[in-house]
Image (spheres, helix red, strand yellow):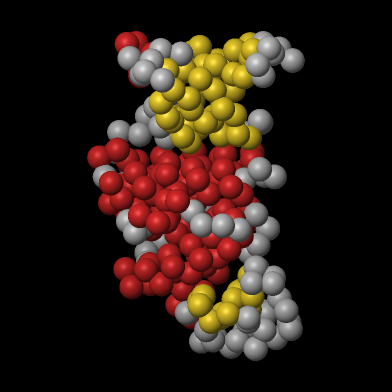
C-alpha cells in the first residue's frame, strides 16, 4: 500500500486525542470510513484542519507499523459556516453523518455524493433543517434499495387505493398495506405518500425545492426516521436529543 494517499472525503466525526491532537472520521467515495489523526490538531495552525462536516481532498500518510492514518494536508471545498450557527442544523448534520456511517458501507460512492450535497443545502438554508432531513432520508432509503413505487403492496401485490394509509412490515423493512403490516407504530398518510412518489425520481436539490407543509413535514419525518432506524438495526445517538 502506498504511504501517501489523496482522498476526497467528508469529515463525519471529530474528537480530541490527549491535549494536542484530534482524531477524525472521514467518509469517502472510494474507501468508505477512514479514521485519521490530525497531529497538533487542537492548537495552533493545525486546529483549522479538517473541521467537522467539511469536505475536500485530504492528503493522508499511512503508517504500516500500527496500521493507522494521519492527515498532513487538506484542500477544502466546503466549510459549514451556516450549519454551525444553528443547533438544530448541527444535529441534523450529525444525523446525516451517523446514519451514513451505519448504512452506507455497501454503496459508499452514492452515499458520499448524497451526504456532500445534502450538507451544502443544509448550510445554505439551516432554518429548513427538517425539510432537508426528510429529503436526505428518502434518498438514502432509495440508495439502500428499500424504496418501492408506493403504488402496490410488495407483500400481497394489492394496488393501493388513492387515499389509503400505509403501514409497515418489519419483516420486509418497507411500507405495506394494513393487512400485511406487523406493526401499527409506523404509518404513512396519503398526502405524505404522494410527496414521496413525486420526489422519487428527483435529485436531492430538486426535491428540496418541492413545497411540503409543516404538518406533513412532521408526520413524514417521524415515518422516515422510524424506517431508517429500523434498517440501521439500533438506536441512533443523534435522534435521542429530541432536536430533530
Q: At which x and y percent is residue 16?
A: 41, 26
Q: Nearer the viewer, residue 99 or 162?
A: 99
Quarter where residue 76 is shown? top left
Q: Is residue 100 left or right of residue 157?
A: left
Does the image show residue 241? Answer: yes
- Which image quarter holds the C terminus? bottom left
Quarter where residue 155 is shown? bottom right
Q: Residue at x 67, y 19 (%)?
A: 67
Q: Residue at x 54, y 60 (%)?
A: 229
Q: Residue at x 57, y 43 (%)?
A: 101
Q: At which x and y percent is residue 202?
A: 54, 56
Q: At which x and y percent is residue 15?
A: 42, 30
Q: Is residue 111 left or right of residue 81?
A: right
Extreme-left residue of the structure? 85
- Which image quarter holds the N terminus? top right
Q: Nearer the viewer, residue 77 or 232?
A: 232
Quick check: 212 above or below 57?
Answer: below
Q: At which x and y percent is residue 212?
A: 37, 67
For the image, the number of numbered tags is 0
Quick check: 30 above or below 226?
Answer: above
Quick check: 83 above or below 235?
Answer: above
Q: Residue at x 55, y 69 (%)?
A: 197
Does the image show residue 205? Answer: no
Amino acid at each position: 500500500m502506498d504511504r501517501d494517499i489523496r482522498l476526497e472525503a467528508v469529515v463525519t466525526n471529530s474528537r480530541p486525542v490527549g491535549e494536542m491532537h484530534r482524531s477524525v472520521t472521514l467518509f469517502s467515495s472510494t474507501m468508505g470510513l477512514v479514521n485519521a489523526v490530525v497531529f497538533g490538531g487542537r492548537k495552533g495552525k493545525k486546529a483549522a484542519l479538517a473541521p467537522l462536516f467539511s469536505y475536500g481532498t485530504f492528503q493522508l500518510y499511512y503508517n504500516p507499523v500500527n496500521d493507522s492514518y494521519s492527515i498532513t494536508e487538506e484542500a477544502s471545498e466546503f466549510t459549514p459556516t451556516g450549519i454551525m450557527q444553528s443547533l438544530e442544523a448541527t444535529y441534523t448534520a450529525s444525523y446525516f453523518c451517523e446514519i451514513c456511517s451505519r448504512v452506507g458501507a455497501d454503496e459508499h460512492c452514492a452515499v458520499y455524493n448524497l451526504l456532500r450535497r445534502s450538507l451544502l443545502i443544509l448550510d445554505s438554508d439551516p432554518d429548513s433543517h427538517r425539510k432537508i432531513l426528510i429529503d436526505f432520508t428518502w434518498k438514502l432509503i432509495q440508495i439502500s434499495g428499500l424504496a418501492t413505487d408506493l403504488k402496490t403492496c410488495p407483500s400481497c401485490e394489492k394496488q393501493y387505493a388513492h387515499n389509503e394509509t400505509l403501514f409497515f412490515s418489519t419483516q420486509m423493512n418497507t411500507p405495506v398495506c394494513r393487512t400485511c403490516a406487523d406493526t401499527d407504530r409506523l404509518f404513512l398518510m396519503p398526502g405524505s405518500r404522494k410527496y414521496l412518489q413525486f420526489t422519487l425520481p428527483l435529485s436531492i436539490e430538486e426535491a428540496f425545492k418541492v413545497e411540503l407543509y409543516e404538518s406533513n413535514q412532521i408526520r413524514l419525518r417521524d415515518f422516515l426516521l422510524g424506517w431508517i432506524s429500523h434498517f440501521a438495526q439500533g438506536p441512533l445517538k443523534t435522534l435521542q436529543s429530541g432536536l430533530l
